[in-house]
Image (cartoon, rainbow, N blue to C red):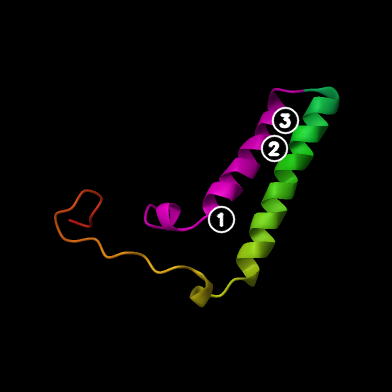
């Protein structure tokens, strides 16, 4: 998962949507809660459907990371 987050957009959008829904349910009330909750649900829906429609060829290639570099595998 740690290697997926920097390269892919959808986990960030999905996490943002989930956080908006959680905040609207736990901290807000009234029309604001409904607006924020529906916004979060819309973000989740768009991220899921967009990700489901993408093929591996649609993702840009990742630049190689040399051994010993910051953020590298070793």
Instruction: Tell me the quarter of the image containing the N terminus.
Output: bottom left
**Helix, strand, or loop for circle 3?**
helix
- Image spot of residue 54 (x, y percent): 59, 71
Number of numbered callouts drawn: 3
The x and y percentages for residue 59 are 49, 68
Task: Find residue 36 and name its label.
Answer: none
The residue wearing badge 3 is 24
Image quarter of residue 45: bottom right
Residue for point 65% across, 43% down:
17
**Would you name the residue on which mark 2 appears?**
21
Picture quarter containing residue 20? top right
Q: Where does label 1 land, which residue?
A: 10
Tag 3: Cα neighbours inside 10 Å, few (<14), some, or many (≥20)?
Answer: many
- Is residue 39 at all visible to an observer of this figure? yes
Q: Residue at x 65, y 59 (%)?
A: 48
Residue 10: x and y, percent? 56, 55
Q: Is residue 63 magenta?
A: no
Q: Which residues, given as a range, are shown in magenta? A: 1-28
Give the CA separation, mark 3 to mark 1. 21 Å
**Side of 41 relative to 31 (left or right):** left
13 drawn magenta: yes
């Amino acid at each position: 998962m740690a290697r997926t987050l920097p390269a892919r957009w959808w986990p960030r959008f999905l996490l943002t949507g989930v956080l908006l829904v959680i905040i609207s349910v736990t901290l807000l009330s009234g029309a604001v809660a409904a607006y924020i909750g529906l916004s979060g649900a819309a973000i989740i829906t768009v991220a899921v459907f967009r990700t489901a429609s993408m093929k591996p060829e649609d993702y840009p290639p990742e630049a190689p990371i040399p051994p010993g570099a910051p953020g590298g595998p070793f």
